[in-house]
Amino acid sequence: MFNLSAFLSYVFVVTFTPGPNNIMSMANASRVGYKKTLRFILGVTTGFFFIMLLSSCFNILLAAFMPKINHFMSIIGALYMLYLALNIMGFRIKKTPHEDFMGENSDSALNSYKSGMLLQFINPKVILYGITLTSNFIIPYFNLTYQLVFFSIFLAMVAFTSNSCWAVFGSLFNKFLSKYEKLFNLSMGLLLIYSALMISGILH
């Protein structure tokens, strides 16, 4: 049965915790404002949509050629979530955006629709997130084309909301996370562990 709470927990934690997309949105907005950063965020949203849709198609093909792949992917997905949880619990909020995005030194070249979209195709966090999420939460229960498109749009909209939050609050949001860093990271890590236990079948 589709577990909505585990699904939403995983989506929320991975999408809203610091990563290349969120940090770049925050950095761009703190420099040029939200309106001029919107093009970058829309690029992120577009790329995110395609990554989610491609992940769904990839997992359907895997399931067709390897019928027993679902159990294997559940194990891999649970282990990856536990890995993320451990990293998040020890995460350091204050990280320069350049460390997360190809080591570039020019922010202005990165604040564009194109750079936001292309970032998704070289962002391992998004790619692994897409494959794990679709294989464990979506494909086993929903595999019709319109359903996959719906979930891809929904996930892209969550990504848009997350990046917008980081951009709007900018340095203020970063200060808040820094102030309550340990509590925030612990909460996010525990939510991920919960999701990992649910897809592994241990709590069933």
Image (spheres, rainbow, N blue to C red):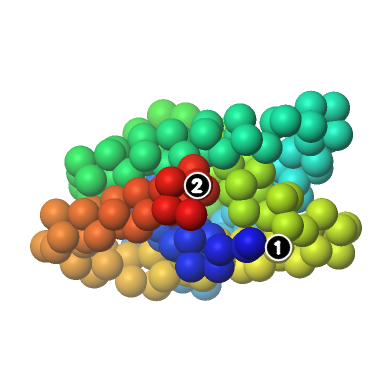
What residue sits right under mark 1 in the picture? 151
Residue 43: assigned label: none
Tag nearer the camera, 2 or 1: 2
Whether residue 46 is visible here, answered yes or no, is no
Q: Which residue is painted at 52% across and 38% down in the image?
A: 77
Q: CA distance from mark 2 to mark 1?
A: 23 Å
Whether residue 141 is visible here, answered yes or no, is yes
181 horizontally vs 157: left or right: left
Q: Nearer the viewer, residue 88 or 169?
A: 88
User: In x, y percent, where is residue 131?
Assistant: 63, 40
Residue 201: assigned label: 2
The amino acid at mark 2 is Gly
Q: Which residue is painted at 42% across and 42% down in the image?
A: 81
Identify the image quadrant of residue 33: bottom left
User: In x, y percent, where is residue 32?
Assistant: 42, 63
Q: Nearer the viewer, residue 96 or 85?
A: 85
